[in-house]
Amino acid sequence: MSAATAHEDTGLQATASASALLINGLIFAGMVWAGLATEGAEENPEPPNIAVELAELPRLGKEPEPNALPRIVQPPAPPPPETDVASLSREIEEAEEEKKKEEEEKKQRELAEEKKRLEEEQRKKEELEERQRKRKEARERKRAMQDALRNLDDPRADDEDAPGLKDGVRDGTSTDPNSLYNQQVYLSLVKTMLERQFKVPANIPADERNRLKATVKFAIDANGKVKGEPTMVRPSGNKFFDDAALTTVRKFGAGSALKLPLPKDAALRKTVLASGLKPTLEGKQAR
């Protein structure tokens, strides 16, 4: 190595050492200065600068400004416990059942009242029909009596001094003309009431019907009802006519609203109840 080269290396090393020493000195000086500055700051701290701005709450019904504070919203209520939900459901069910029960009871009361009203109306209707039926029967008996009196021939008019009666029985035991008169009036009344119910079959021609007669025998009780089965004593010769006559008598039997009158005379009533009646139904008198 030459002397010039050696001298040059020595200069570089000196320069590097001087530079390192200078840098270390600067670092140390900086650290000292920083320590002194920190101590002074702790003894006399300066307050920080804080920027304050006023914010306005928005009015109800007005949209808040973008930079305004958010509106405070009430948080939703927490869900009820499961036990409370079950209790509420049970109370609702009980309330519905009670309501249904009340509606059913109300319906039953209305049905009972309606039934009672209908029964009352039916009772009044039956009473009215019964009164009308009795009035009708009274009118029919009155008309029958009037017809019987108009059509009755008094046998006493033939001979007032005769010891007996023209239509009397040869071995008769009564000489009282009133007895026979009462009997004829009563039989005529019974015949008239029967003929009011007598319906001649339509298959019998009118000219033949007017000639037909049938005598029927039957018994009656103390209530004016035909008892037992009527019998044909003197048939007309026409089976349809005779059957209709028997059917007419049966209409006054038990279970029917129709009934025959009884004689007012006690002796005649006793005879009728014991012996029965034998009226003759005529086709020309049928209604």
Image: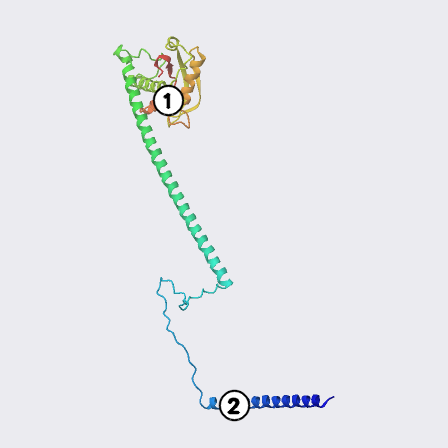
Between discs 1 and 2, the one toward the N terminus: 2
Badge 2 amino acid: Trp
Whether residue 233 is visible to the viewer of this picture, yes or no, is no
Q: Quadrant of residue 235?
A: top left
Q: Mark number for residue 203?
A: none
Q: Residue at x 67, y 88 (%)?
A: 8
Q: Residue at x 39, y 46 (%)?
A: 109
Q: Is label 1 in a helix, a strand or a loop?
A: helix
Above or below, 47 against 148 in this view is: below
Q: Position of residue 15 (x, y in %)?
A: 63, 89
Q: Mark number for residue 33?
A: 2
286 left or right, relative to 38: left
Q: Quadrant of residue 220?
A: top left
Q: Residue at x 70, y 88 (%)?
A: 5
Residue nearest the observer in this picture, 122 or 15: 15
Spatial CA span between label 1 and label 2 = 165 Å
- Count how many numbered circles sit on residues in the image: 2
Which of the image's four quarters has the N terminus?
A: bottom right
Looking at the image, is mark 1 or mark 2 nearer the viewer? 2
Which of the image's four quarters has the C terminus?
A: top left
Above or below, 263 against 169 in this view is: below
Tell me whether circle 1 and circle 2 mark residues in contact (CB < 8 Å): no
Badge 1 amino acid: Val
Mark 1 Cα within 10 Å, few/some/many (few <14, many 20+)? some
181 left or right, relative to 24: left
Q: Which residue is mark 1?
A: 272
Residue nearest the observer in this picture, 38 or 179: 38
Q: Position of residue 237 (x, y in %)?
A: 44, 10
Residue nearest the observer in this picture, 87 or 34: 34
Q: Is label 2 in a helix, a strand or a loop?
A: helix
